[in-house]
Amino acid sequence: MIQLLILYYLSLKSTHGYEIQKFIQLNHMEEWNNIKSGSIYYAMNKLQNDGLITLVKTEGNTEKKKLIYSITEKGQTSLREMALTELNKPIAGIISEKYLVYPILANLKKEEILSSINGHILELQTKIKVIDSWDYEKKGTATNVEKATLTLMKESVEGQIKWHNILAEHIDETISAVDKITHMIQSTDFSERNQCLSID
């Protein structure tokens, strides 16, 4: 997800790693998305080696120089592919990279977002059927821990289905919020800020 976030950010404007790192910190992504700001430079090096971003200029003096990167055409293509991949991933507990929805949706069309969501919901509904079949097989023989495990598994999948249904039902509102965040990133140098901005 860190690579997707970097590509998304650089698709909006050319900038340096510190600004993206500061954006991650100001929005507390390390706490609720499991995106580590410390991994930003390693990820940028890999993206550059893979030809997805390129160094366009260097600003400042030797001690405080900033390496300004831009996304490449190959990076734009990879950004769309990564976004679709992330959209189809399951939500993993209370900390999930998928909750960082705007870099996922920003480079996708509404129709393909909805198609992906609906396909993922069908996969999740299949998982519910599998869990129900396990529960049926265990009737009368399941230990309390096994019963609790099956209940937790089912509730987790049901919660994911609910989340995706809400995303689909409120897709226009979400896309509007994504557009506001996109504009905010384009017009703000987060390396100069000490607090995040509201999208209201």
Image: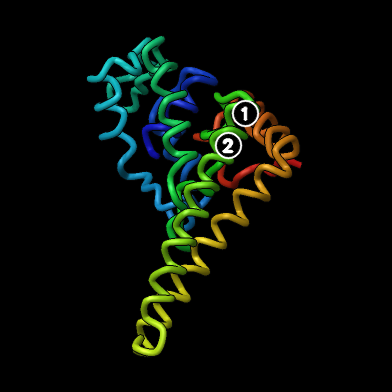
Rendered residue at 55%/24% (across/down) = 107
In the image, which disc is placed on residue 86?
none
Residue 140 in picture, x, y percent from top left? 39, 89
| Residue 65 position (above or below residue 114) | above
Which secondary structure lies at badge 2?
Answer: helix
Task: Describe the element under mark 1 as helix, strand or loop.
Answer: helix
In the image, 11: left or right of 111?
Answer: left
Residue type pointed to by label 2? Tyr
- State if disc 1 and disc 2 touch (CB < 8 Å): yes
Q: How many marks?
A: 2
Label 1 environment density (alpha carbons within 10 Å; few <14, some 14–19, many ≥20): some
Residue at 47 percent of width and 31 percent of height: 83
Looking at the rendered structure, the kind of residue marked 1 is Thr
Nearer to the camera, 157 or 190: 157
In the image shown, does 138 or 64 lie closer to the viewer? 138
Q: Which quadrant of the structure image shows residue 177? A: top right
Location of residue 60 by image quarter: top left
Q: CA distance from mark 2 to mark 1?
A: 8 Å
**Disc number lying in front (2 or 1):** 2
Q: Quadrant of the C terminus?
A: top right
Q: Is residue 195 left or right of residue 28?
A: right
Q: Position of residue 10 (x, y in %)?
A: 46, 22
Q: Position of residue 182 (x, y in %)?
A: 62, 28
Q: Looking at the image, which residue is at 64% across and 26% down?
A: 111
In the image, residue 43 above or below residue 62:
below
Q: Which residue is mark 2?
A: 102
For label 2, the crowd category at 10 Å Cα-Cα, with few meaning under 14, some 14 to 19 and many 20 or more, is many
Residue designated by label 1: 182
Q: Nearer the viewer, residue 94 or 19?
A: 94
